Amino acid sequence: MTKHVVSVSGGKDSTATLLIALDRCPPGSVVPIFCDTGNEHQAVHDYLAYLEQALDIQIHRLKADFTEQVMAKRRFIARDVRIGRDDKGRKVRWTNKAKRRALAVMHPSGNPFLDLCMIKTRFPSSAAQFCTGELKRDPAVEFQLALVDAGYRVISWQGIRRDESINRRKKRKFERIGPRMRAFRPIIDWSAEQVFAFAKAKGIEPNPLYRAGMGRVGCMPCINCSKADLRQIAVRFPDHIERIAEWEGIVSACSKRGSSTFFPPGTDAHAAQDVREVFAALGIRNRVEWSKTTRGGKQFDLLQVLDEPSTCSSVYGLCE
Ligand code: SF4
């Protein structure tokens, strides 16, 4: 027997994919899943509830739990006396002061995104996109492997489109991803307009976050968000900016160097050595101020990474 597992993100593409699966597959064989990162807007959760009610389905919520890893990291920091290197190859030692600072804040929060960043002592970036892997891919794979172990064949339905990014341009419509597991990407050649029109024809409303000016729906903010998205988030949902600013303080305290920012530094910013200087230049509040500016200027060089939105390149296509 086959189970059709549809990864639902609350965005337009995965919603259209879910609607196709419900149309084509035998009743009871469609299994929608949602991977909760702990960094989504409440509107995403509300939209899932709307889909469940409108389509008479149940969406399985999957949420990673890093409680044990946070506790293990605390033990490691308490014992560690080695001189290590940071991500730029510079020698950094866990000083007693840094240990006290980290151990004071590093406690399991129950929020997967924050707990993961505390363990890694940094935020993810497009070059080190561990958020997709550990918050979405791993729980989704674990869920699907359990179905395989229970004797099912699994088709993993993914709502990705080639015109979203270079990463996705060469994705195939069908792909073998493991024993008794296949990927199927039914809207791979669709345009965004087709996706919206399809859902509308089915009587399904889009996630209200699109009407609020968001270009993509998922984490708020996503580490890959565009300058325009960041500006919209700051204007419409400033509480999410404040939450990230608070997380920057916690993750910074967890790191050896004492600083970590949600968006990675650009090349010029590597020169910033002083912790206060890093925060002044690169913290989320400063990035928001930059997002309100026009292109160019000194700041643009520091922050250009934000102006080139990219998408998740995971085989599972889990982030919009
Ligand atoms: S890539 Fe963006 S949407 Fe995906 S898990 Fe990371 S922050 Fe969230």
Image (spheres, rainbow, N blue to C red):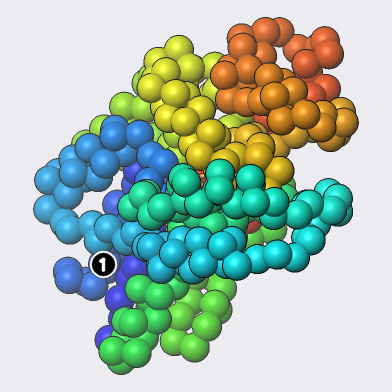
Q: In this view, does 191 lie to the left or right of 50?
A: right
Residue 142 location, quadrant? bottom left
Q: Where is residue 284 in the image (x, y as percent from the top left)?
A: 58, 25
Question: Dot 1: what SS?
Answer: strand
Residue 49 location, quadrant? top left
Q: How many labels does the image show?
A: 1
- 176 shown above or below 250: below
- 3 shown above or below 6: below
Q: How crowded is mark 1: few (under 14 residues within 10 Å), some or many (20 or more)?
A: many
| Residue at the spot 49% in from the left edge and 88% down from the top edge | 179
- For this rendering, which residue is in front, 87 or 12? 87
| Residue at the spot 27% in from the left edge and 66% down from the top edge | 31
Q: Position of residue 19 (x, y in %)?
A: 29, 52
Ligand 1 within 8 Å of disc 1? The answer is no
Q: In this view, does 305 lie to the left or right of 267?
A: left
- 44 shown above or below 173: above
Q: Position of residue 202 (x, y in %)?
A: 25, 41
- Can you say which quadrant of the picture contains the N terminus? bottom left
- 244 shown above or below 100: above
Q: Position of residue 270 (x, y in %)?
A: 84, 34
| Residue at the spot 79% in from the left edge and 61% down from the top edge | 83
- For this rendering, which residue is in front, 164 or 294? 294
Residue that label 1 marks: 30
- Residue 137 in view of the camera: no
Q: Is residue 276 left or right of residue 116?
A: right
Q: Is residue 148 left or right of residue 313?
A: left
- For this rendering, which residue is in front, 114 or 156? 114
| Residue at the spot 31% in from the left edge and 86% down from the top edge | 152
Q: Which amino acid does label 1 sit on?
A: Val
Q: Which residue lies furthest to the front in this view?
A: 96
- Residue 116 in view of the camera: yes
